[in-house]
Image (cartoon, grey):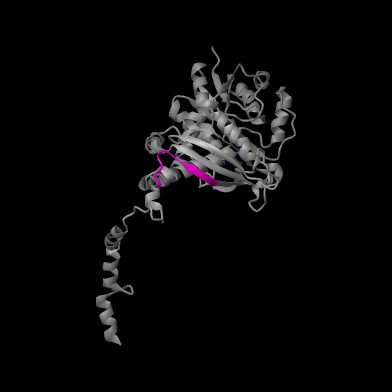
Amino acid sequence: MKKQRIAVAYSGGLDTSVIVHWLKERYNAEIVTVTGNLGQRKELAGLADKAYRTGARKVYIQDLRDEFVEEYLWPSLKGGALYEHTYPMATSLGRPLLAKALVDVARRERCTAVAHGCTGKGNDQVRFEAAVAALAPELKVLAPVREWEFRSREEEIAYCERHGIPVTATKKSPYSIDENVWGTSIECGILEDPMAEPPEDAYQRTASPKQAPDKAQYVTIDFREGVPFALNRKYLKGFDLIEELNVIAGANGVGRMDLVENRLVGIKSREIYEAPAAVALHFAHRELERLTLDKDVMHVKAKIAHDYADLIYNGLWFSPLRLAYDAFINETQKVVNGLVKLKLYKGNVEIAGRTSPNSLYDSGLATYTEEDSFDHKASEGFIKIFSLPLKTYYRINKNGLSKKRRVARKGRK
Ligand code: ARG
């Protein structure tokens, strides 16, 4: 009988290494590993070799960087998607794409199941499994970490030693870190205490504001239909633009966040994030929208941004609702063209200037000089009608009382 095949989302870390061997034994299966390059700075060289030595039958390492930027990051930027007004969601946006890559390989390799290394307490399991449900409802999903016997890292290492699984002998950081080009998510260790200020060694990719240059650094970003395409007037491919901006903004201490957040599974957790480019780009994009969006569109879009972020965070990327939001958002972005100048200084991003061919800023209307073209007299009639409901209400309800009750009260005196 032909052995069944399982595709495993593989990072090369301890958990997914154990998974490869564990699934192989438990299901008497052939394992195909799938690793996605989303611009994490971790070395991917040597990973294929490691996967084979761990027992993989076949190894896929996919370059997903451009797809990640074009199909996931830019839509989230255009939508202003910041979870709980803060987190740009590097992790949340990466999961659906990794799940998609996993499903693609599973189909090509005729696998009957896919597996991931997420724990039972996090959001990532939901994101993986909801994505697989949408993309390949026929595939079974296995989550070994949710059901296996190991209770600690030490037990997993002992298992590796028993079975000759290579474990990279690096000193284990006290933190759990997830990273891609859009940002780094850091939790565990001392960070589990919300009162503890993050120690400097928790940060992976940003300078401490104290250490950052004493002189402000200016950058410009050009946008076309809400998408950045040039940094300091230099045309760049999306991925490269984000990478370059990560370095510049990170060196100025920009992009650090310390967040107590609401997970989908009902837990409050504390995590710190570093996303220098994402923070700067969200800021710049919002500033350009202030200049170019019609007031009503801007206000409705802000309400949608909140729900759009929730949807992404909650793992519903592959959903009809997301497509519907994208249709709305893309319609709004047709006029979001222009240039934003940012000032980066010791952890802060400030607006230093903005200009757009679609600018709705009319200096004739805005000015207080003799160039003024605003019709002042028209305001009088406008205010009369605008405030008419208030006039009516307070004529009837003086001091919050109706006329009838006012009369009754007077009579009692
Ligand atoms: N809390 C973030 C999210 O749900 C990140 C999760 C992964 N974090 C980590 N440090 N491994 O999107």
- The verdict on residue 223 being magenta is no
User: In the rendered image of this protein, does residue 189 appear above or below residue 71?
Assistant: below
User: In the rendered image of this protein, does residue 190 appear above or below residue 74?
Assistant: below
Residue 267 percent coordinates (x, y): 55, 47
Which is nearer the eye, 93 or 395? 395
Residue 175 percent coordinates (x, y): 67, 40
Residue 81 percent coordinates (x, y): 48, 41
Q: Is residue 265 found left or right of 42 in the rendered image?
A: left
At 71% from the left edge and 42% from the top edge, which residue is drawn?
201
Q: Is residue 168 found left or right of 390 in the rendered image?
A: right
Which quadrant, please, contains the C terminus?
Answer: bottom left
Q: How many marks?
A: 0
Q: Is residue 142 found left or right of 156 in the rendered image?
A: left
Q: In which quarter of the image is residue 117?
A: top right
Which quadrant, please, contains the N terminus?
Answer: top right
At 55% from the left edge and 22% from the top edge, which residue is drawn?
7
Which is nearer the eye, 160 or 248? 248
The residues colored magenta run 351-361
User: In the rendered image of this protein, does residue 189 appear above or below residue 140?
Assistant: below
Q: Is residue 210 found left or right of 60 in the rendered image?
A: right
- The verdict on residue 354 being magenta is yes
Q: Quadrant of residue 378?
A: bottom left
Residue 256 percent coordinates (x, y): 61, 44
